[in-house]
Amino acid sequence: MLIARVEADRVRSLTGVSFEPDRGLTVIIGPNGAGKTNLVEAIFFGLTSRSFRTSDRRDLIPFGSSYARCRVTVSSRGVDHVFMASASRSEGNRFTMDGAKIEQSEAVLHRPKVTVFSPDRLELVKGPPAARRAHLDSFVAARWPSQAGVRSAFGRVLAQRNALIARIAAGQGDRSQLATWNSQFAEAGSALARSREQAVDELGERWEMAAEELGLEGPKGLSYRPGSATSAEEIQAGLEEKLENDLRLGRSSWGPHHDELRLEMDGRQLRRFGSQGQQRLGLLALLFAERESLLATGGSAPLMLLDDVMSELDERRRERLVERLLEGGQSVITAAEGELVPEREGIARVAIRDLTEAGAVDQTRGQST
Ligand SMILES: Nc1ncnc2c1ncn2[C@@H]1O[C@H](COP(=O)(O)OP(=O)(O)O)[C@@H](O)[C@H]1O
Ligand SMILES: [Mg+2]
């Protein structure tokens, strides 16, 4: 699956921008403030109806305008589908495929998986563990589609058990129901924890290699840290042990929803002790490890959207990055200067100025007719 065309009608500073990315690697070049990140966001928005920068899609509406809209044409074995996402102050959000409203669960079957690297995503490495757990779970879903439901299955049991615990804590609940929910929690929790362990086993070495290659020096490790446990029996026992604490707090205070995906360098957490640059490399390496695993196991390569990725890398590493991207799959990357991107055959270079000025001309024409 490839994206054949992007039409950012109106997204932030972009109006009437239309372009056809290469099947391989496209580099978008332009100075700061030119709209490169906005273009990457527009592609992501068109494909998913979401933004990786904000949870409020109205941020994408150009200043002084009433809506944002982007269309992305996805080509798969000769068949085209046009995805359209829009956000409007008066009409809310819309997401369609070929003109008909579509749900996320359906859309993912017809579009490539999208992987985004952007400075805004550093939170994934720096921030609290919840985002890393969610990220790992989405990798599990992509790598082992039959396990795609483990996260939400656990989430449902957790919500039920939490509700029961809160009722008991308030003196209203029925303690005899605890046994059922504990055992369901243990089963679902174990399935979830095991899927994450399996994902970390699969990604660990690839992450270390990619990180080394990109310039994260020294011993490294990726690990899943169950603060809880991974077998159903252990989880069950743990729940019983922690029960009084749970009742005091009024929620399930222990379990896979507190576990951690840990990225380490020199035996220390990248999250707490890494420099911003090292954290960037750690994140980038994680995204590459996932891509490599999907490619190696016969999955399709995700579309890589890498925003402002070159700035932190020295020349040799920029070369390795570009070589990796040229090995297969479609990617769109941005760079402030063309010189930051090594000369290689097969790279399509696009100046953002050409896209935005063409857009401005179209717009004037539109107004005069
Ligand atoms: N909703 C919006 N409407 C119009 N312009 C916006 C909006 N949000 C951000 N911008 C503008 O987009 C520009 C930044 O674009 P950006 O894609 O981040 O540039 P680059 O990544 O090339 O440095 C800024 O001038 C900012 O004011
Ligand atoms: Mg930018």
Image (cartoon, rainbow, N blue to C red):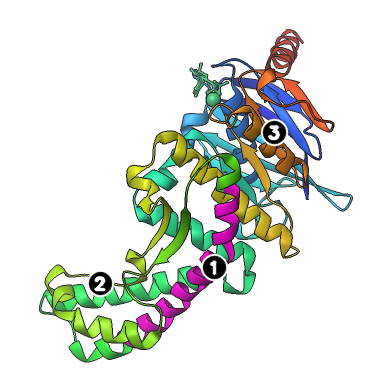
| Disc 3 crowd, CA 10 A, few/some/many (<14, 14-19, 20+) | some
- Is residue 84 found inside the magenta-colored segment of the image? no
Residue at image location 20% in from the left, 78% down from the top: 242
Figure check: 25 above or below 270: above
Q: Secondary structure at mark 1?
A: helix
Q: Position of residue 72 (x, y in %)?
A: 71, 39
Q: Is mark 2 within 8 Å of ligand 1?
A: no
Badge 1: residue crowd in 10 Å (few <14, some 14–19, many ≥20): some
The circle drawn on residue 201 is 1
Residue type at tag 3: Glu
Kindly identify the residue that appears in the image at 26 percent across and 89 percent down: 177
Tell me the kind of residue under disc 1.
Asp
Q: Which residue shows up at 73% across the image and 33% down it?
A: 6
Residue 346 drawn at (x, y percent)? 84, 33
Find ligand 2 in the image and state its quadrant.
Answer: top right
Earlier residue among tags 3 and 2: 2
- C-alpha gap between disc 3 and disc 1: 28 Å
Q: Which label sits in the foreground, 3 or 2?
A: 3
Q: Nearest to the eye among marks 3 and 1: give it.
A: 3
Q: Which residues are magenta?
A: 182-210
Mark on residue 319?
A: 3
On the image, numbered disc 2 is attached to which residue?
A: 252
How far apart are the alpha carbons under marks 1 and 2? 28 Å
| Residue 210 appears in the rendering | yes
Q: Secondary structure at mark 2?
A: loop
- Give yes or no for contact between labels 1 and 2 (Cβ–Cβ under 8 Å): no
Q: Is residue 348 above or below residue 210?
A: above
- The x, y position of residue 297, in whole percent, is 72, 65
Q: Is residue 10 above or below residue 282?
A: above
